[in-house]
Amino acid sequence: MNTDNHNMDDVLVHVRGLSFQRGERMIFDDIDLDIMRGKVTVIMGPSGTGKTTLLKLIGGQLRPNQGTVEVDNINVHRLSRSDLFELRKRMGMLFQTGALLTDINVFDNVAFPIREHTQLPEALVRDLVLMKLEAVGLRGARELMPSELSGGMARRVALARAIALDPMMIMYDEPFTGQDPISMGVLVQLIDKLNDALGLTSVIVSHDVVEASAIADFIYVISNGKVVGKGTPEELQASDSAWVQQFINAQPDGPVPFHYPATDYLEDLLAGVNE
Amino acid sequence: MEWLSQLGRSGLRFFERLGRGNLFLFYVLLGSFSLLGRGRLLLQQMYSVGVLSMLIITVAGLFVGMVLGLQGYNTLVDFGSEESLGVMVALSLVQELGPVMTAVLFAARAGTSLTAEIGLMKTTEQLSGMEMMAVDPLRRVIAPRFWAGFISLPLLAGIFSAVGVFGGYFVGVGLLGVDDGAFWSQIQNRVDFYDDVLNGIIKSIVFGFVAAWIALFEGYDTVPTSEGVSRATTRTVVHTSLAVLGLDFVLTALMFD
Amino acid sequence: MFHSKAIEIAVGVFVAAGLGALFILAIKVSNLSAFSDEAGYPLQARFDNIGGLKVQAPVTMAGVRIGRVDKISFDDETFEAVVTLKVYDQYDQLPKDTSASIFTSGLLGEQYVSLEAGGDMDNLQPNDQFMITQSALVLEEMIGQFLFKAAEGGTE
């Protein structure tokens, strides 16, 4: 479907012919994606297009109906459970809610993956945790419980936890949703900074066009299970696709209809009368 | 025709769930070996599952024993055999009430909190998050809770029965004037260790297994919404109670063989 | 993680209480203590009818428990019940002509074997048989005899 001319070694996540169905509904229909090493790739699309599902497919939490997902040249869905877990140690994921463990405090949350996967002495664990917390600016909040954090802080703690094992890539699930402008700005800056400082590969799923465009190196726009547009932010701005234009410029109606698919309006109203 | 297909649908759903439940149990048991080196996890769960249930079990056991003493005395005194009060109280507790009541109270006290905890962890993506951190929630979260419940229930049932016998003793000997020596000697003469006490312990072990399994599976299989969690919690109590009562009948029938 | 010491202690108390309760049930509430009794020597008694005597029933002498019923079998040549008693080793001075009877404790209670010493100078040896035994009283037989006697009395 598309011919990619970049070097295979630069591609960290290689998605080919991916189809995924939930019940009768087609979430993805034969899509191809390439996520470049060391870059920030943003996957955009309206709510309900299964962007979170895409991350779960890449992370191996869901199985596709068709197609392959390769991360670092390893086919994610051919792996045994233990090999998959090995791979996941090199992938971080930031959930929309943060998904912090609610029964332990901030420090222990960040220490959790370190303690689970390494036998490091406690003094070293402490140093590592404080370094990660410092990176997200929450070293002072280490004693707080997750319930005492604001949404933005919870996401930053989750980010510290995601980078605790120094992964090669991080997947962000809607990191900007429901944030006030300040914490949104903080998060945008953090993601950008961490990506460069740690040499990470970042995959961001988002529908916040402005923020995401600000840090994106490459953008995929997905709708109705298809990739409808891709390119650098500038290329997309200049795109002549009506669909991409509607999305980027936030127009209420267009190729994405305002109405959920329904029977004819008049018919529907009259149906009640006829009964 | 409609009800027939409805029946078929429910049947299919039932067996699907049963299958998932068994698979769940299989993986939990498989994941239990990693628990060997991590006693701290088990300890923490023994605390929240066992220690925190101790109060309600002790109080309930005491009162059940006292009621048995009172009721039993009123019946037995008509036959002039109130010395048998101890036997009646002890046998009822050790064979039936101890294991069954403890399992039902356990479902209400510890089972619901396990279901709600796991269900909320699922709803808030904590389980998913753990999986993405390459930590298997079945090993890290479920297995310690399962074993904690499995170990705690027989201990709690033992406490229930023992406290209950003393409750009966308190009412019978202390308040109603049954002879102290007769109370104990009758018990020791009639209550058999293998046929009665051991069978009661076996029952409570089986109940512990079932109660922990149901509570954790309901939590793990929760529909991740607030309504889903509340339904799952209710189901834990209902299913555990029914399973325990049904199994009690089966086990009793087997043991009397 | 903060109060791990307190949690350890609490769990320790819980496990100790649970095991203690099971121990109490085993020792104080059941007959386990009577089970693990000291060794005894066997004696045999033949009865015409043992009524409702059960294995593990007490064997008493002057009301004191000195052993228990070990085995009950049926001799199909003499049509008698053969009851093997186990008498504790410390009571090895039973005269040879001791008699064994089956009694009922209370009106509806369980049945037990009561021994009554005779005057012989020799003592019973292991596996000896009692010379004199008295069978259990069966309620129906007693009533039958009573009615029979009453009927006899009536004709006179």
Image (cartoon, coloured by chain):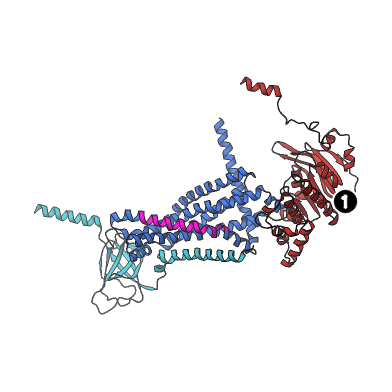
Chain colours: A red, B blue, C cyan
Secondary structure mainly formed by the magenta segment: helix
Q: Amino acid at mark 1?
A: Asp
Image quadrant holding the N terminus of chain C, namely bottom right
Q: Position of residue C27 (x, y in %)?
A: 43, 67
Location of residue C86 (image quadrant): bottom left
Residue A121 visible, this orientation: no
Q: Position of residue B241 (x, y in %)?
A: 50, 49
Q: Is residue B69 magenta?
A: yes
Residue A22, placed above or below residue C96? above
Image quadrant holding the C terminus of chain C, namely bottom left
Q: Residue at x 39, y 59 (%)?
A: B168
In the shown orientation, is residue A207 left or right of residue C102? right
Residue C51, placed above or below residue A54? below
In the shown orientation, is residue A120 left or right of residue B153? right
Query: Which residue extends farthest top?
Result: A274
Q: Position of residue A233 (x, y in %)?
A: 87, 42
In the shown orientation, is residue A47 left or right of residue B186? right
Check disc 1 and report its element: helix, strand or loop.
helix
Which residue has dot 1 on it? A10
Residue B12 visible, this orientation: yes
Q: Position of residue B64 (x, y in %)?
A: 42, 55
Q: Residue at x 42, y 70 (%)?
A: C36
- Pointer 1 indicates a residue of which chain? A
In the shown orientation, is residue A151 left or right of residue B220? right
Residue C13, placed above or below residue B145? below
Where does the magenta region start and end? Answer: B48-71
